Image: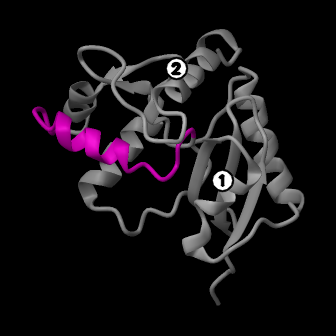
């Protein structure tokens, strides 16, 4: 029996966050929105609305809140829906998940880690399409020449905020 898709939405220091899941298997995470309505609109294709958080969802929210105050937080235990990913995409996502908080790696460095040196652009594409920001910390992956991009309503400023949280405990 398939679990129904649920959506939890909450405000944070980096803007509104929405997390859709089936029985806590994360389907999508959206961050950095200016309002509850804006983040909810990004989930319209799923035809779901926000739910009043149950006990497990409140725990999920608390984990994000702890992370955003600079508390060391392990997101490796969070299961993500990755069945639609290729083997390469899965390897990049899993390698990204293992980048320590506060550290960064270049797209090329991440490509080398997954045994595909020279595939920096392909890694960049995987990171650009990341459906699980923070859980899959794409903000820790940077261009060889500097910061690189970040997909989301606030763009690179969200990437900078997340890096600041990990280094200083404060969103810049």
Using the image, determine if residue 9 lies above or below residue 103.
below
Instruction: State the mark number for residue 39.
Output: 1
Quarter of the image with the N terminus in it = bottom right
Name the residue that disc number 2 marks: 160
Q: Which residues are magenta?
A: 116-134
Q: Quadrant of residue 145?
A: top left
Quarter of the image with the C terminus in it = top right
Mark 2: which secondary structure? helix
Q: At which x and y percent is residue 115?
A: 17, 38
Q: At which x and y percent is residue 99?
A: 44, 28
Give the residue at x 36% y 44%: 128
Give the residue at x 77% y 65%: 50
Give the residue at x 60% y 11%: 167
Q: At which x and y percent is residue 103?
A: 46, 17
Using the image, determine if residue 26 lies above or below residue 23.
above
Mark 2: few/some/many CA within 10 Å (<14, 14-19, 20+): some
Is residue 122 shown to the viewer in this render? yes
Q: Is residue 167 left or right of residue 99?
A: right
Give the residue at x 52% y 24%: 157
Mark 1: which secondary structure? helix
Using the image, determine if residue 73 lies above or below residue 85.
above
């Amino acid at each position: 029996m398939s679990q129904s898709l649920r959506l939890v939405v909450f405000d944070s220091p980096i803007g509104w966050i929405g997390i859709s899941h089936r029985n806590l298997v994360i389907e999508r995470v959206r961050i950095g929105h200016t309002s509850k309505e804006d983040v909810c609109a990004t989930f319209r294709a799923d035809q779901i609305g926000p739910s009043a958080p149950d006990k497990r969802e409140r725990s999920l929210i608390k984990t994000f809140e702890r992370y955003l105050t600079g508390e060391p937080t392990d997101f490796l235990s969070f299961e993500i829906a990755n069945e639609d990913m290729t083997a390469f995409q899965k390897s990049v996502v899993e390698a990204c998940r293992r980048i320590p908080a506060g550290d960064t790696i270049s797209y090329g460095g991440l490509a080398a880690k997954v045994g595909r040196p020279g595939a920096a652009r392909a890694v960049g594409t995987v990171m650009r399409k990341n459906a699980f920001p923070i859980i899959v910390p794409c903000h820790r992956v940077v261009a060889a020449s500097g910061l690189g991009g970040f997909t989301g309503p606030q763009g690179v400023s969200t990437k900078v905020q997340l890096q600041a949280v990990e280094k200083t405990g404060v969103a810049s």
